[in-house]
Image (cartoon, helix red, strand yellow):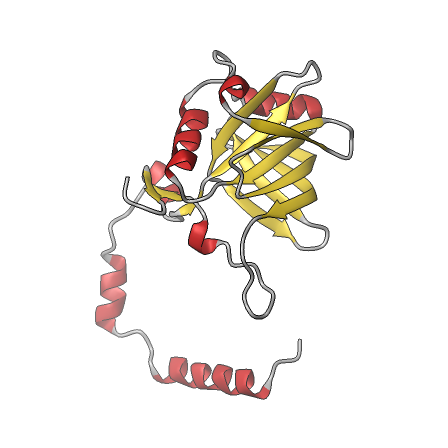
Amino acid sequence: MAVSPSTARALQSLSLTWKRSPMSESSARRAQEYPAVTGRDIAALQDPRPMIIIGACGPNGETCFATVIWVTPLSHNPPLIAFALRAKSRTMQLIQQSRACSITALPATEKAVELAEYCGTTSGNIVDKASQVPHFIATAENGSPVPVPELAYAWEVCGVNDIQQAGDHLLVICSVEKAHIDCKRDKKGRLIPHDMLLCVQHGTYATDRVL
């Protein structure tokens, strides 16, 4: 891959700096003294992360939503994205039936926090979440209906490529079939959603005002 002259000079300078500045004994000792973490704290090392709503419909029209934060892009071309859900999740069960879902990012607002909390703490095996979540229906390429919360800041309609066991979760790998977002672009035409994207860390939300 070709790089610009300025980038090449910067990389050369960085290389020289690293060669001239090996880690001191005190730095190495300090790194070894970092407290060890286990369990849920390991996942928290990647926080804060965007708060995402996954939506799905079953063949009989049943609709459900789940809140997740374990979501990641996998590929630009073709556009692939993956997320993790527990197998017992009703939304997960509908995804397995329909092989389609929606992935919705939320705006940094109080209403979005309420939606995320509701979808994340209420079981779709007990409560009809869809009756409490205003939404519209999009259609996946396989013909399955896909529910999208009206509060969406950005949303994608996805077809499910694969579902794999991943420890105590299931990993869903999706092809993005449609994608829409309501945000500004910078001078180079790049999307700049970060200033309004709802994120969470240890139950604390980044919003447009103090809650």
Q: Position of residue 99 (x, y in %)?
A: 70, 28
The residue at the far top in this view is 126
In the rendered structure, the answer to whether residue 26 lies left or right of residue 72 reads left
Q: Considering the image in quadrants, where does the C terminus appear? A: top left
In the displayed structure, would residue 127 be above or below residue 101? Answer: above
Q: Considering the image in quadrants, where does the N terminus appear? A: bottom right
The quarter of the picture where residue 63 lies is top right
State the count of labels. 0
In the displayed structure, would residue 175 be above or below residue 91? Answer: below
The quarter of the picture where residue 43 lies is top left
Q: Is residue 166 visible?
A: no
Name which residue lies at 52% across and 34% down: 53
Name which residue lies at 53% across and 26% down: 134
Name which residue lies at 58% across and 38% down: 103
In the displayed structure, would residue 60 be above or below residue 105? Answer: above
In the rendered structure, the answer to whether residue 199 lies left or right of residue 131 reads left
Q: Position of residue 150 (x, y in %)?
A: 55, 33
Query: Who is closer to the viewer here, 74 or 127?
Result: 127
Q: Position of residue 179 (x, y in %)?
A: 65, 45
Q: Is residue 193 visible?
A: yes
Name which residue lies at 46% across and 43% down: 107
In the displayed structure, would residue 23 be above or below residue 198? Answer: below
